[in-house]
Image (cartoon, coloured by chain):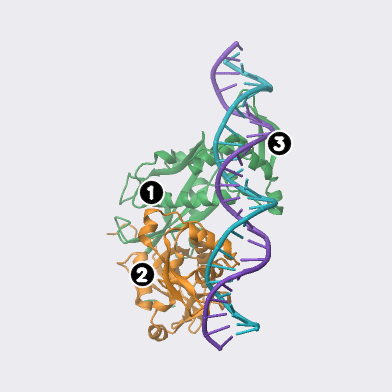
Chain colours: A orange, B green, C cyan, D purple
Amino acid sequence: MTYYNEHSKVWVSVDVIIFGFDQSKLKVLIGRRQMDPGRGEWSLYGGFVGADEGIDEAAERTLYDLTGLRHLYMRQVGAFGSVERDPGERVISIAYYALINVKDYDDNLRKEHNVEWVDYNQLPALYSDHNEMVSKAIRIMRQKIKTEPISFRLLPQLFTLTQLQRLYEAVLGEEVDKRNFRKRIKDMDFIEKTELIDKTGSKRGAFLYRFNKKAYNEDPNFKL
Amino acid sequence: MTYYNEHSKVWVSVDVIIFGFDQSKLKVLIGRRQMDPGRGEWSLYGGFVGADEGIDEAAERTLYDLTGLRHLYMRQVGAFGSVERDPGERVISIAYYALINVKDYDDNLRKEHNVEWVDYNQLPALYSDHNEMVSKAIRIMRQKIKTEPISFRLLPQLFTLTQLQRLYEAVLGEEVDKRNFRKRIKDMDFIEKTELIDKTGSKRGAFLYRFNKKAYNEDPNFKL
DNA sequence: TCAAAAGTGTTAGATTTACACCCATGA
DNA sequence: TCATGGGTGTAAATCTAACACTTTTGA
């Protein structure tokens, strides 16, 4: 049990970039840092990796602690470990990004933790290297969203095609042609049209769609 | 200086997946582990992150220690941190992959460190989760090599188009059409034909090409 | 009646893929 | 002379991108 004693240990933390989608905007969940150093600065939500827990588990614990939700989509962004990154002590942090349907997140719990949904395009300067983490996360997510059906993690179970399109536009940061977009959606049989109609977004109303996971697993060709 | 004392520290290491290219094969530099636990098992080359060194610096130091070379192409693969990943103690490891021209690596130095170039397709079972690291590295590299001119890092300064094609085939793990490949190369003005001819690969001889970094920076549209 | 979002096809251009033969040389 | 790798172009198919009008309804 004493193999590596000549080497020094460091603190390792996880920071989670939690993406949400609301009002056609991509949002990130951030809060004012509650501890020193950096108390009061805008920051991602994070936590330390315990001695007896894996880094993925630590990230899941942290996410659960904040949201009360499990089984969210979460992927590693990478490790951030320059010596000066934390103004207090040497801490290496591993960033993760998670996708959440804003409506699933209990707003009281959100307030208890003093975190807010902030528009991705209006993010303030964040503590330490957290802005870098967000940048890298969105880069990874932009790749993923084109080849894997992760977008549905940001939407309610039932959604209109316009909502889905706005989501892509928000994530990719560019406009999408409506007709070409819908053409591609039609080719994906696992995006199912229901008979339900949403009247909140327009007077005329729009058909609601749902993602059929089983159908996707049988024929997983997603391509946007 | 005592902000995070309630939390526990862990060892953090770096492991480097060093890719090379020789005889139309993609190679990985691995060796027999020289320390306990796992002594004698095939393993990536790695090292511990010091208290006063960033993780990227630690990776560069490790790579330099092994190869005597600096300014190699190196990128982070990700952090690996399940509790049981190291059979001895709790160690979180951050994997990097590096690209090297095999000819640039002094073979005596290689032998001193007891490492070998092993065909990527014939890799043995490696220590701990090192096989996973390699898998993730190649996945990342396959993406990159299609959109950034990193392939030249694996080749001598002068190379034939067939060598370049074989490299792509080795990395992507699939055959490439010769004519279509050369057509695309012709569109990239920063891959310059020289008047030099390589006669080692064929009786007829093949023109040697070089990558013009300056021309690339002026017009960086790489697309394979 | 009009403003606002939903819905719907076609076409030109660009990109991708498949494919086969002649050339130069050294052994 | 022949085996080996070097070098070259075209055509069909597919994919991508651009583009405008009608419908429905609540205010």
The chain that hosts pointer 3 is B
Locate residue B32: give its quadrant: top left
**Residue shown at 36%/65% (left/top)?**
A56
Q: Position of residue B201 (x, y in %)?
A: 59, 28
Q: Nearer the viewer, residue A14 or A28?
A: A28
Q: Nearer the viewer, residue B59 or B190?
A: B190
Image quarter hosting the N terminus of chain A: bottom left
Q: Looking at the image, can residue A190 be seen? A: yes
Residue B60 drawn above or below residue D12: below
**Residue shown at 46%/66% (left/top)?**
A151
Residue A8 drawn above or below residue B145: below
Is circle 3 on the same chain as circle 2? no
Q: Which residue is mark 3?
A: B194
Q: Secondary structure at mark 3?
A: strand
Q: Secondary structure at mark 2?
A: helix
Q: Which residue is mark 1?
A: B131
Q: Which of the marked residues, 3 or 1, is nearer the chain's N terminus?
A: 1
The amino acid marked with disc number 3 is Thr
Q: Looking at the image, can residue B3 be seen? A: no
- Is the residue marked by circle 3 packed among few (<14), some (14-19), or many (20+) residues within 10 Å? few
Q: Nearer the viewer, mark 1 or mark 2?
A: 2
Q: Verify CB contact (< 8 Å) between mark 3 and mark 1.
A: no
- Is the residue marked by circle 2 packed among few (<14), some (14-19), or many (20+) residues within 10 Å? many
The chain that hosts pointer 1 is B
Q: Position of residue B107 (x, y in %)?
A: 50, 37
Residue B95 drawn above or below residue A192: above
Q: Which residue is mark 2?
A: A60
Is circle 3 on the same chain as circle 1? yes
The amino acid marked with disc number 1 is Asn
Q: Position of residue A140 (x, y in %)?
A: 50, 62
